Image (cartoon, helix red, strand yellow):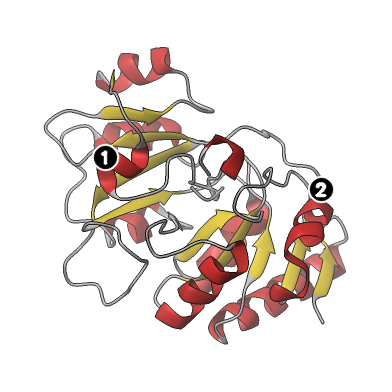
């Protein structure tokens, strides 16, 4: 049976963060708040846990989850190269509603699915989730909904869809943003917008000369268009995580 913690209560928040961290270390799933929508997360370095996450959502390896991090340093360890504009984008928009797609570090031992050698990374602006991430390390996080269903903006909405497939629910109140993260591809010579979201195209152009591209995130980098929860949006728009 799932455990539920109201993170507006200091005692429950502390207990919930410990329970969630322990669950992640056991390879179980947790639901967590973000500044976009709620996410469902697992240990990014446990192939079995990632497979459990995908199964809980009803999706396959062709739709790999993004990764949420608690620090910029953690993100840097996951990627080969941020390119000429990646650091500028991070400095301006992290923590916040920007997901970047980069070439994954070849030294990492993990299996997120059919990523085509890339990883989508975001540092969310939510203190509960950042505290959890600093305890667990990087987590694979997708939007907390069944594939094909609307994304959850409350923990209760997530529980209605995911039920007891999740070990721990962290209730951080309604999502502050309710809008998916913006996704930018940094794997090419110039940064490309893969999905519009919380960060406007105008701001991206201003900071890093980001240009729009045709097609979807999945076509560009091996991820499902829309998923970055963790950045994450719902499957009704293509589903990153939150």
Image-quadrant location for residue 169? bottom right
**In the displayed structure, would residue 174 be above or below residue 13?**
above
Question: Which part of the image, by quadrant, shows the N terminus?
Answer: bottom right
Does 242 sit left or right of 144 as displayed?
left
In the image, residue 173 lies at what x, y percent? Answer: 81, 48
Distance of mark 1 from mark 2, alpha carbons? 34 Å
Q: Nearer the viewer, mark 1 or mark 2?
A: 1
**In front here: 50 or 87?**
50
- The residue sitting at the left extreme is 189
In the image, residue 12 lies at what x, y percent? Answer: 85, 69
Q: Secondary structure at mark 2?
A: loop
**In the displayed structure, would residue 160 be above or below residue 52?**
above
Does 126 sit left or right of 158 as displayed?
left
**In front here: 231 or 215?**
215
Q: Secondary structure at mark 1?
A: helix
Label 2 CA crowd tier, 10 Å (few <14, some 14–19, many 20+): some
Q: Residue at x 67, y 59 (%)?
A: 32
Q: Residue 228, which numbered label?
A: none
Q: Which residue is mark 2?
A: 173
Residue 152 shows up from this direction: yes
In the image, residue 30 lies at what x, y percent? Answer: 65, 69
Residue 46 shows up from this direction: no
Q: Residue 220, which numbered label?
A: 1
First of labels 1, 2 by sequence position: 2
Q: Residue at x 73, y 73 (%)?
A: 168
In the image, residue 107 lies at what x, y percent? Answer: 18, 72
**In the displayed structure, would residue 183 be above or below residue 227?**
above
Q: Residue at x 35, y 39 (%)?
A: 217
């Amino acid at each position: 049976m799932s455990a539920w913690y109201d993170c507006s209560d200091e005692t429950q928040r502390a207990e919930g963060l410990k329970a969630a961290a322990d669950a992640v270390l056991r390879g179980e799933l947790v639901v967590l708040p973000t500044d976009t929508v709620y996410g469902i997360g697992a240990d990014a370095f446990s192939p079995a846990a990632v497979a459990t996450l995908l199964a809980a959502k009803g999706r396959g390896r062709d739709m790999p989850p993004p990764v949420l991090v608690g620090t910029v340093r953690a993100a840097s360890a996951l990627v080969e190269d941020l390119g000429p504009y990646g650091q500028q984008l991070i400095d301006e928009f992290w923590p916040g509603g920007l997901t970047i797609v980069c070439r994954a570090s070849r030294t990492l031992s993990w299996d997120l699915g059919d990523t085509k050698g890339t990883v989508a990374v975001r540092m969310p602006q939510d203190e509960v989730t950042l505290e959890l991430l600093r305890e667990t390390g990087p987590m694979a996080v997708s939007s907390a909904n069944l594939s094909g269903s609307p994304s959850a903006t409350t923990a209760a909405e997530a529980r209605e869809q995911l039920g007891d497939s999740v070990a721990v629910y962290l209730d951080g109140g309604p999502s502050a943003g309710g809008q998916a993260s913006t996704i930018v591809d940094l794997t090419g010579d110039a940064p490309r917008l893969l999905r519009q979201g919380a960060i406007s195209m105008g701001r991206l152009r201003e900071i890093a000369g980001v240009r729009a591209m045709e097609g979807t995130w999945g076509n560009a980098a091996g991820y499902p268009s829309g998923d970055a929860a963790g950045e994450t949006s719902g499957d009704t728009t293509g589903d990153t995580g939150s």
